[in-house]
Every structure is written in C-alpha cells, then in structure tokens.
Image (cartoon, rainbow, N blue to C red):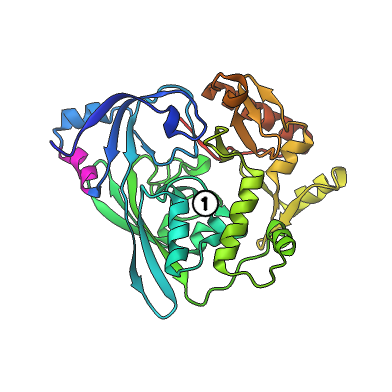
C-alpha cells in the first residue's frame, strides 16, 4: 500500500524540543490526510501488529518528555496548508493543517489582515497540538478563537468534526488529552483519533487583549498607548524571548507545570503564611496561583538533577543542560527533577503542581 511507508528506528533527538536522545521504533510521516485512513484498510492482523502498543502523535515535539525509546507507532504530522475558508459579518474563518507550525499561522494571519491570535505568538509546537492543550498566553486561550476541527478515528478511518463545545476545553485540557479524573471518559478522543485541520474564528471587530502586567510594562517602555495587533505580536515575541530559552539552543518543553487553581479559602490560608504569593482571582471564585513563583520560593531556580535543570531566568521552565555539560539529559532525570519540585511545593504550600508535557 503506497500510503503506508513505515520507517524503523528513527532518531527523535531533533524531533523533541527538550533534545532528549531517543528512537522511534516505528515512525510514519503523514503528509496528507488520506494516509490516516490506510490503517483501517489493512488486514486485521497487520493493523493489530502496528497498533499493538497504540500510537503517539508527534508534531513539533514541544510538549513531550521522552523517557526512553518510543514503542508505540509514531505518527509524525507533516501536513501543510493555511487558508481563509469562510467569513461572515463578524468573523474571518481561517483553516490550517495540523502539521503547520503554530507561530507561522499567527504571523500569516496578521500578514493577511486577520487579527486575533497575536497574544499567542511564539508558542512552540504545531497547529494540531494547539487544541489538544488549549494553548494560552497573555490573557488569551485557543478556545477564545476556536471555531472547529477535523480529525480521523484511527481504528476505523472515519473522519469527523468537533466544535468548541464538543472539544470540552479546560485549562490546558480537551477531549484529546488524557485527564487524570476522566481517563476512561467515553467522549475522550485521546489515543483514538488524530487532528488533521483546525479552524479559527478571528473577529472583524477586533479589540486588543492587554490585561497582563508584562504587556503593560512593555507598552510603557515603548511608549505605545493603542497598539495594533502586529505591535502586540512583536511585544509578546520580545517578552517570551527575554524570559524563555530558545529550544534550538537550550532544550526545553516550555512551561513545565500548570498554574494550580485553589479555593479562595486555601489561597487566604497561603497568603497568611506567604503574603507575597502571586495569585489571580478567577470569575468562578477560585484563585490561580503562579506556579513559577511557587517553584522559585522553594529555591529551585538554577538548580539541577544530573543534566536536567531549572532555568535560571524562569523557574517554570525545566531545561536540558546539554549545552553546559556536553551530555544530554535523559527523560528519567527530567521526571526526577519535576517530582522533586512537586514534593517541595506540596510540602511548603500544600499545593500539587501538575506537569504540562505528555510523558512518553
């Protein structure tokens, strides 16, 4: 079958932004959607052999930690294409293939005159991964601009589409990501389907989202009072580059922990002990705590376990110290460091930090 070309023992060192050395036992490069139906057309015994240990979708490799060689079939998304597919009186509807780089989509929409994604500039990863994580930054989440997506159920080859409600977005969650408390949920598509296209609704009556202090400081620094979408994009890029390491230079998976959400009472108790804690009240009465501040307060900034370390400019980011030591961090070292941080934060604040990356 021409659509089914499986590569064996493929190095993944440069296919994960953490730069962890590992191999994919079997890897299939997806360059067009029709390929995904091929598995369902295989003889049952052949399909079972390929999918005996499931499958892993790999886009930009920016939100994974590899703890060893990958035994499940790796679907490497390399599809391309961005286009305006519809519009109405209020929105432009833009579609992008899952294999496109997210930041390329942000810059393309701005070049075309479709604002709305500027706060999400420079978030690493692919378009297909964006709804899985419900990516967000600087006051905006993907769900705020999401229209719908297309996906393929791997076992059957069936194509289907989901709107925002069906994606069941939450904080860095969706039906495409395993949720600890809902891992057996019947509506979960994690490990069952692959996203092929994402559509976004970008507002014609655009209004800037400028609530974050970092953006306010950058505007004051540049003496900008009413920024354009392009200017916001440029400010976000500058802020992120100043705070976060470039994965091409220092291996990392971006923000490693979610900002924990606690009750108002629990937050009051913590403030009583730690008056300086950075926190953000949410509309539902709960409070979001800054995970980076919690980690920093526990003294982890700049510390390391083996060749895995905590970035010295942003404690929320764990890094591969390969550039310093000449030896690549292993996934085991990264997880050991993450667990040590979780223990420290829980012992001091009574708060559990949840890892953002998918551990494979």
Q: Is residue 92 left or right of residue 122?
A: left
Q: Position of residue 315 (x, y in %)?
A: 69, 37
Q: Residue at x 61, y 46 (%)?
A: 241
Q: Which residues are the magenta region?
A: 34-41
Horizontal side of 268 relative to 33 (left or right) equals: right
Residue 110's place in the image compared with 337, above or below, is below
The residue located at (53%, 55%) in the rendering is 121
- Place residue 40 in its image quadrant: top left
State the image quarter where residue 211 is shown: bottom right
- Estimate the x, y position of residue 242 in percent, counting from the top left: 66, 46
Taking depth in this image into account, of 239 and 275 the one nearest to the observer is: 239
Q: Is residue 201 visible?
A: yes
Is 54 positioned to the left or the right of 321 in the image?
A: left
Residue 15 sits inside the magenta stretch: no
- Element marked by disc 1: loop
Please indicate whether residue 346 sits to the left or right of residue 271 in the image. left
Quadrant containing the C terminus in the rendered view: top left
Residue receiving disc 1: 135
């Amino acid at each position: 079958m021409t659509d089914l070309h499986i590569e064996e023992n493929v190095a993944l060192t440069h296919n994960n932004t953490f730069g962890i050395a590992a191999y994919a036992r079997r890897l299939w490069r997806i360059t067009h959607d029709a390929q995904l139906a091929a598995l369902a057309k295989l003889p049952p015994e052949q399909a079972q052999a390929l999918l005996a240990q499931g499958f892993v979708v790999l886009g930009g490799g920016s939100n994974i930690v590899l703890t060893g060689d990958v035994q499940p079939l790796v679907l490497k998304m390399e599809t391309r294409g961005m286009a305006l597919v519809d519009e109405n009186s209020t929105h432009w509807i833009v579609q992008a293939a899952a294999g496109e780089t997210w930041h390329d989509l942000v810059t393309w929409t701005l070049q075309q005159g479709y604002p709305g994604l500027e706060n999400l500039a420079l978030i690493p990863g692919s378009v297909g991964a964006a709804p899985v994580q419900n990516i967000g930054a600087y006051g905006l989440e993907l769900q705020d601009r999401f229209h719908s997506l297309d996906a393929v159920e791997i076992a059957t080859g069936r194509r289907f589409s989901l709107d925002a409600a069906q994606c069941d977005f939450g904080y860095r969650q969706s039906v495409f990501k395993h949720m600890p408390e809902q891992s057996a949920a019947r509506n979960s598509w994690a490990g069952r389907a692959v996203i092929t296209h994402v559509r976004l609704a970008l507002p014609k009556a655009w209004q800037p989202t400028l609530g974050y202090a970092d953006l306010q400081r950058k505007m004051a620094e540049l003496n900008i009072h009413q920024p354009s979408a392009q200017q916001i994009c440029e400010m976000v890029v500058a802020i992120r580059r100043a705070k976060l390491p470039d994965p091409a230079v220092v291996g990392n998976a971006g923000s490693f922990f979610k900002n924990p959400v606690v009750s108002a009472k629990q937050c009051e108790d913590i403030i009583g002990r730690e008056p300086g804690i950075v926190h953000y009240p949410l509309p539902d009465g709960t409070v979001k705590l800054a995970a980076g501040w919690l980690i920093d307060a526990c003294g982890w900034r700049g510390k390391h376990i083996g060749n895995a370390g905590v970035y010295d400019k942003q404690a929320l980011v764990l890094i591969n110290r390969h550039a310093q030591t000449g030896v690549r961090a292993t996934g085991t070292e990264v997880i050991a460091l993450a667990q040590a941080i979780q223990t420290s934060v829980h012992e001091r604040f009574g708060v559990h930090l949840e890892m953002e990356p998918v551990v494979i």
